[in-house]
Amino acid sequence: MSVWKRSLDAAGVREPGLRKNYDEQRELVARARRTSYLAARLLLPRRLLPHVVVATAVMHHGDDLLDTGPKPQRVAAWAAWEQEVRKALDTRTSDDPLIRALLHTTAAYPRLRETVQEYLSTATTDLEFTGFATEADYQAYVDAYSLPAFMLIASLLGPESDDGRYRAACRTLMEGSQRLDFVNDLAEDLPEGRLGIPAETLARFSVTVEDLVAGRESAGVRELVEDQVEAARVCLRAAGELPVLGKGPGGVLLESVIRIELLTADAASARGARLLRGSASPPVASTLGVLLRARRRTREEHGSRTPDT
């Protein structure tokens, strides 16, 4: 029996139709977020893996609705999806495969229901996003969109009860991760009219949007990139030093995510102004090294296999 099928058993997903719904989400996540799925498969308890896969699928589907197509199309698609999810949470029924799996996961982890509702309430922030005037605007975006989206997954990975410290640690992680995404994805975002670096930060380095769109690899652009990557590193390192992140069943996974993000930051820093022509990725060997070392740690702590409970 495969690891995935054993994971479905451990998660209490027994009904054949529901197992098929979870299978569809696994295929989507494994295809769209390959490294994330590999990390989850290697490092999470089997009972938790299917639920994290479904939460990831919800986030991925939401990203697609918010980012794909002309704005009127995106607004309508998101409104229809939000209404469908909210109705399903109230009635506990749905014909949609993703929502059916989500309903089972929220039944197993009731705290996820509130997290989903928060995400639905704030995700439209991304529909309006085209850029930031100030650093304060960036911080507001992290609070309204990045953190609620991440908490779909993080709420399953952390301790069962949170006095606020776990969410605060996740917020620190997302402040760094989102900033890294914005600078690393310049080549992808600029043609779409999106820029995640605040205008006041551009001005500080005497860089204009026109410089970035034209792909000018000036000294100012190089300094801007390094400034943003280092700011991301500061938050990622700070999150990695917060012990509360390692307390839940997904602690080893979260620590590995931070290490891989730091590898990405190193790759982005090395690419510098050439990020205007394409994003940077962490070295495959280094990424696999992080995951394998984390896997050995879980085996040492829990025996020869990933724990089922």
Image: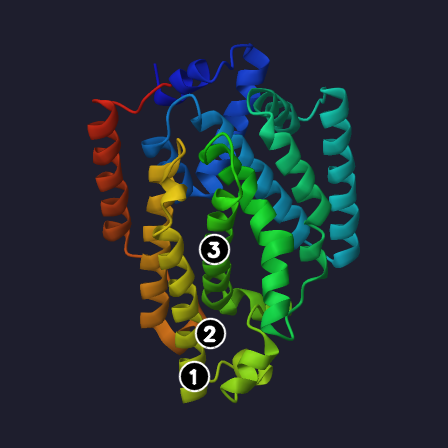
Which residue does the image show at 54% across and 45% down from the upper left? 150
Amino acid type of the residue tagged 1 in the rendering = Glu
Give the spatial CA distance, label 1 vs label 3.
30 Å
Label 2 close to label 1 by CB (< 8 Å): yes
- Name the residue at the front extreme: 163
Mark 2 or 3 closer to N-term? Answer: 3
Question: Of discs 1 and 3, which sits in the foreground?
Answer: 3
The answer to whether residue 123 is visible is yes
Element under disc 3: helix
Which residue does the image show at 71% across and 20% down from the upper left? 92
> To which residue does mark 2 refer?
276
Question: Quadrant location of the N terminus?
Answer: top left
Residue 305 picture location, percent across and down: 25, 23
Label 2 close to label 3 by CB (< 8 Å): no
Q: How many marks?
A: 3
Residue 285 picture location, percent across and down: 23, 50
Residue 232 picture location, percent across and down: 43, 64
Q: Nearer the viewer, residue 301 or 130?
A: 301
Amino acid type of the residue tagged 3 in the rendering = Thr
> To which residue does mark 3 refer?
172
Element under disc 2: helix
Give the spatial CA distance, label 2 vs label 3.
26 Å
> To which residue does mark 1 refer?
217
Give the spatial CA distance, label 2 vs label 1.
8 Å
Question: Quadrant location of the C terminus?
Answer: top left
Position of 73 relative to 225 (above/below)? above
Amino acid type of the residue tagged 2 in the rendering = Leu
Name the colour scheme. rainbow
Residue 178 picture location, percent across and down: 51, 59
Mark 1 or 3 closer to N-term? Answer: 3
